[in-house]
């Protein structure tokens, strides 16, 4: 299957993408991984992206599109893929359609993870990260540490990243509503959108998504 995953920040896209890609035996292609790979490998697109990022500017659509197309050209993505974070606006969505159309294929589904804004804020603003190791993460409500403010793994101090503050989350949601949400309507007009609730346990959401995709493919 060729799938695009959409949803607001905090919807659990990365987590669900990893599980779904494994179950469907297709590569999980995230924008973050594309950027990291191109920058670390020093590709021409990676160097361009790094220049914009160092200047504190947004990476232009054409650079992001180029990275995505290069990745989709790879052999493992030919039978199918799950895109996470791309496309993020209508320009990128139209470019993806053009790219796929030139290869005689098309998307099978756009999976929309729906979650209330209040839950998004609670999920992200409640995160706490270890200062010693950023891979050690907790949540004040959903995954509290044994001792308040102390990492269970190494004893480091837990803190709230600036990106996780409520003000920052609200700004990220504004960007999502302005730039990314319109592509849901774009894909709805093509009959591709499948919307599911992203509330509940991770396994429940994964099963919900698998059932919805199976129904879509039937």
Image (tube, helix red, strand yellow):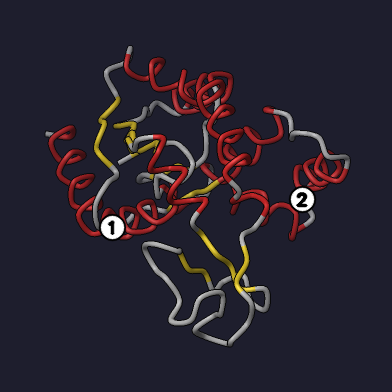
Q: Is residue 175 above or below residue 44?
A: above
Q: Nearer the viewer, mark 1 or mark 2?
A: 1
Q: Secondary structure at mark 2?
A: loop
Q: Nearer the viewer, residue 190 or 168?
A: 168
Image quarter of the N terminus: top left
Task: Say which residue appears at 55% left-offset and 64% top-offset.
Answer: 128
Outermost residue on the bottom side: it is 154
Residue 118 in the image: state x and y as whole percent.
40, 38
Residue 208 in the image: state x and y as whole percent.
18, 46
Q: Image quarter for residue 161?
A: bottom right
Q: Nearer the viewer, residue 122 or 185?
A: 122
Q: Image quarter for residue 179?
A: top right
Asked if the residue under mark 2 is in contact with the one under mark 1, i.e. CB atoms within 8 Å, the reply is: no
Residue 120 in the image: state x and y as whole percent.
43, 42
Q: Nearer the viewer, residue 162 or 87?
A: 162
Task: Say which residue appears at 44% left-offset and 52% top-offset.
Answer: 14
Residue 85 numbered mark, or none: none
Residue identified by numbered label 1: 202
Q: Image quarter for residue 160?
A: bottom right
Q: Earlier in the sequence, mark 1 or mark 2?
A: 2
Q: Nearer the viewer, residue 133 or 98?
A: 133
Residue identified by numbered label 2: 43
Image quarter of the C terminus: top left
Residue 4 in the image: state x and y as whole percent.
40, 36
Q: Secondary structure at mark 1?
A: helix
Task: Say which residue appears at 63% left-offset and 41% top-offset.
Answer: 168
30 vs 134, left or right, is left
> Separation of disc 1 and disc 2 at Cα?
36 Å
**Label 1 packing within 10 angstroms: few (<14), some (14-19), many (20+):** some
**Label 2 packing within 10 angstroms: few (<14), some (14-19), many (20+):** few
């Amino acid at each position: 299957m060729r799938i695009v995953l959409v949803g607001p920040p905090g919807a659990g896209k990365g987590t669900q993408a990893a599980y779904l890609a494994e179950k469907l035996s297709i590569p999980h292609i995230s924008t973050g991984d594309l950027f990291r790979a191109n920058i670390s490998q020093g590709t021409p697109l990676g160097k361009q992206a790094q220049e914009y990022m160092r200047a504190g500017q947004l990476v232009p659509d054409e650079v992001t599109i180029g990275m995505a197309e290069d990745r989709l050209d790879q052999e493992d993505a030919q039978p199918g893929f799950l895109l996470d974070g791309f496309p993020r606006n209508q320009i990128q969505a139209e470019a993806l359609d053009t790219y796929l159309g030139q290869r005689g294929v098309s998307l099978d589904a756009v999976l929309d993870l729906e979650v209330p804004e209040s839950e998004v804020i609670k999920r992200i603003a409640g995160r706490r990260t270890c200062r010693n190791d950023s891979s050690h993460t907790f949540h004040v409500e959903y995954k509290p540490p044994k001792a308040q403010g102390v990492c269970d793994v190494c004893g480091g101090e837990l803190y709230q990243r600036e990106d996780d503050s409520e003000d920052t989350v609200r700004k990220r949601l504004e960007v999502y509503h302005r730039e990314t949400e319109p592509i849901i309507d774009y894909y709805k007009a093509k009959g591709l959108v499948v919307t599911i609730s992203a509330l509940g346990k991770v396994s429940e959401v994964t099963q919900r998504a698998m059932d919805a995709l199976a129904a879509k493919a039937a």
